[in-house]
Amino acid sequence: MQVRWNYKLQPNKAQQALMGEWLVTLRKHRNYCLGERKRGFESNNQDSEQAVMYGYGSFCDTETRDEYGSFCPLSCPVIKHGVLSSGLLKTNKPREDKKTKEIIPAKLSWGNASDVQSKRTTELRHENAYFARIYSGVLQGNLAKLDAAYTGFFKHERGFPAFRKTANFKTFQYKPGQAKLEINRASKSKRCYSHISLPGIGDMRYLDSRTIPIDAEIGTITVMKEADGWYISVLLELAEELPPCAEIETVESAVGIDVGINKLVSLSDGSFIENPKFATNKKIRRQLRIRQGRVSRKVKGSKNRRKAGIEVAKLHKKIADKREAYQWQAANKVVKTADAVVREDLNIKGMKSRCKPKKQKGRFMPNGQSAKRGLNRSISDASWGDLFSKIGWIATKAGKPVLAVNPAFTSQECSACHHVSKDNRDGEKFICVECGHIDHADTQASRTIVKRTNFEFVSTRRKNLRGDFSKVTTVRHDSAIRGKRDQGSNRTSKAMPEKRILGTQLELFG
């Protein structure tokens, strides 16, 4: 089982400055290599005035990747896989074929784009002192990540690699066996300090918040720069095996979950997981507004502006850490509830899309985007996608299946009679206009979700709401005549049959 564990580093000032310098050089190295590939792919280096030129063979053998001659047509597969530096061409010596005893003439041979640029990186280490200060394994790993991204583009797995800015290039990586860990196993404390040796940077200690098992195999080690300091992410191959996922036919009970804004998760057993709104509550929004205002008042490019920006980044990091910890607790609670988890297959990106513009007589009219902006901010703060990922991982470790169902009309469908109508729901209150079923709207939606998989939730905690419960809509005689629900300040013009509602309440609640 592969996992990633993160630890916070404790580097000195010289080591921090050196790692920051590495990030700048590695970003330039990646952009330089990507620019070479992009230029070679788009223009085939015709009429190029760059110092580094590229040559292509007139014939390419796709199996042995041998070239004959000087140039080739655009159909050559090297166009898709990168470029070839004319100064790095290798000429094979004439050799004798062992079977036919014929002399094979000398020819030009070349590797893929990663091989060519790896040799070019070695040249850069002799030409530039900044490249020479970086550990060679880190430079080669930086090139390998670019090669994976570039190859994925032609396999239609992702978009074309982007040129990285300073803000989105914060990591570099050591291959397995390059960085050495000295784990402090003698300490009985849960949080102690261990040491790590990073080639090219030196030894430093890190906060060992979770001790690595003795039988764990250590893979790649990624060094990350965050707003509040430097971290390492260790890839571990644990001896523990993931249990097999239970078959759908053997599932005895399932829990349906409905995610939202007011309640982060509503479970089909009637319980809720509250939404703390880490980034959208009044206190945090005020803090963000104040700190962002301080940044905007500083002179662009000044040290004070950079310091103010770090304070904003630290607050965002604090919010993200709180959300991460809370979602792990919520995911554990959901998975432990039943033998299977059923959720909605939501298109979260589509839910946060902008409203279509409205144009009349050459002018753009109000389209509701200003009001929807707050909803989009709340959806991003709730982070439903990350929550689903955590539920899936914990369920995988427990051997429990996670099913995703169509989310259409889950909040409007009655779980008792399956009648679908938008009149059934009003806020957090649900009363079926067909059969009079009463329930909390979010709980009702979660039970509809789990019933779409033909599972049943077995629990002794299932609640039946009283007729006078605050979240249940009751209808008085005079309001029914007027065709309005009696909901205090929240009144609506939806008419409901008085006798059917009152009769159902008497049957349910005595």
Image: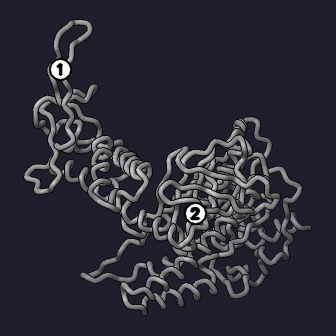
Cα separation between marks 2 and 1: 53 Å
Q: Are marks 2 and 1 in contact (CB under 8 Å)?
A: no
Of 310 and 91, the residue lying toward us = 91
Extreme residue in the left direction = 47
**Labels 2 and 1: the sequence-earlier one:** 1
Is disc 2 surrounded by few (<14), some (14 to 19) or many (20+) residues within 10 Å? many
Residue in the picture at 82% in, 58% down = 188
Q: Is residue 100 left or right of residue 288?
A: left
Tell me the residue that label 2 is attached to.
231
Q: Is residue 370 left or right of residue 226?
A: left
Q: Compared with residue 499, is residue 405 higher up or lower down, i.e. above or below?
A: above
Q: Secondary structure at mark 1?
A: loop
Residue in the picture at 58% in, 88% down = 286
Which mark is drawn over residue 94?
Answer: 1
Instruction: Where is residue 63? Give x, y as percent.
Output: 28, 26
* Dot 2 amino acid type: Tyr
Of 48 and 347, the residue lying toward us = 48
Q: Compared with residue 249, is residue 161 higher up or lower down, i.e. above or below?
A: below
Residue in the picture at 17% in, 20% down = 94
Residue in the picture at 42% in, 63% down = 22
